[in-house]
Amino acid sequence: MAEETPQDLEQEEILEESSGGVSPVIKIIIIIIVLIILSVAAFFVSKSLLLPKYQAYKAAKEIEAIEQAKNKVATMGLIHIIDNITVNTLGSGGRRYVIAEVALEVKDQTVIDEIILREAQIRDEFIRYLRRQTAQHVLDLGFQERSRRELTRMLNSHLNTGKVDSMYYIKLLLQ
């Protein structure tokens, strides 16, 4: 038998590694193929199982939102009208005045009864509020919204049986 040289030993090890083991490139290709198969399987599972459940959930939520909106808009409270409020504006010297009519919306008849009992006091509050306004303030685009909030807050501070939910201007003239 001939003695093996170190070069022969190295060549034998290289041959054993290459013939017995799988090359790293093949391992990477196998991993990529397995990942692709898993991704496709996950896609089809989510599309066939999860997507229909999500769509049904989303449709149910939309129907619920529509029902809530219908219920919210459908009801309007009781209305009491305070009419014929005529007031001189601040700084006009009696030459400019405001004519106003308002509708007060409430949920309960007992609140309307209290408003009727306190109508003189409520009219006085409206008159005092409008007298503090100049003609320019009344002409301002934001006046209606601001005055609605302020007057509603003021009215609610006088009421004991409930509260005014909304106030609407039926007439608001500046002469």
Image (tube, grey):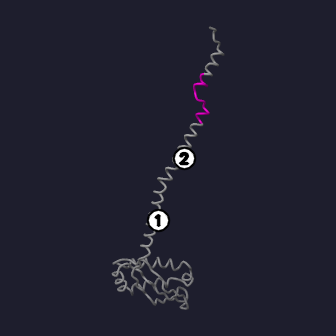
* Quarter of the image that includes the C terminus: bottom right
| Residue 28 picture quarter | top right
Numbered disc 1: secondary structure: helix
Foreground of the two, 99 or 77: 77
Label 1 with label 2: CB-CB less than 8 Å: no
Q: In what quadrant of the picture does the N terminus appear?
A: top right
Which type of secondary structure does the marked residue at label 2 adopt? helix
Near-viewer residue (160 or 75): 75
Give the number of the mark in front: 1 or 2: 2
Residue 40 shows which numbered tag? 2
Please tell me which residue is depicted at 51% across the width and 53% down the height of the picture.
Answer: 47
Seen at 53% across and 85% down, the residue is 90
Residue 109 against residue 65 in the figure, above or below = below
Which residue is at 55% across, 91% downward?
95
Compared across the picture, whether 107 is left or right of 3 comes to left
Q: How many marks?
A: 2
What is the x, y in percent for residue 63?
45, 66
- Relative vertical location of residue 19 with respect to residue 99 in this rendering, above or below: above
Identify residue for label 1: 62
Mark 1: give few (<14), some (14-19) or many (20+) Cα within 10 Å. Answer: few
Q: Residue 112: x and y, percent?
A: 36, 83
Q: Amino acid at mark 1?
A: Glu
Q: Which residues are magenta?
A: 16-28
Answer with the quarter of the image where residue 75 lies.
Answer: bottom left
Q: As drawn, is 31 to the left or to the right of 168? A: right
| Image vertical order of residue 36 relative to residue 168, above or below | above
Who comes first in sequence, dot 1 or dot 2? 2
Main secondary structure found in the magenta portion: helix
Q: Where residue 141 sits in the image (x, y, percent)?
A: 56, 79
User: The disc labelled 2 sits on which kind of residue?
Assistant: Val
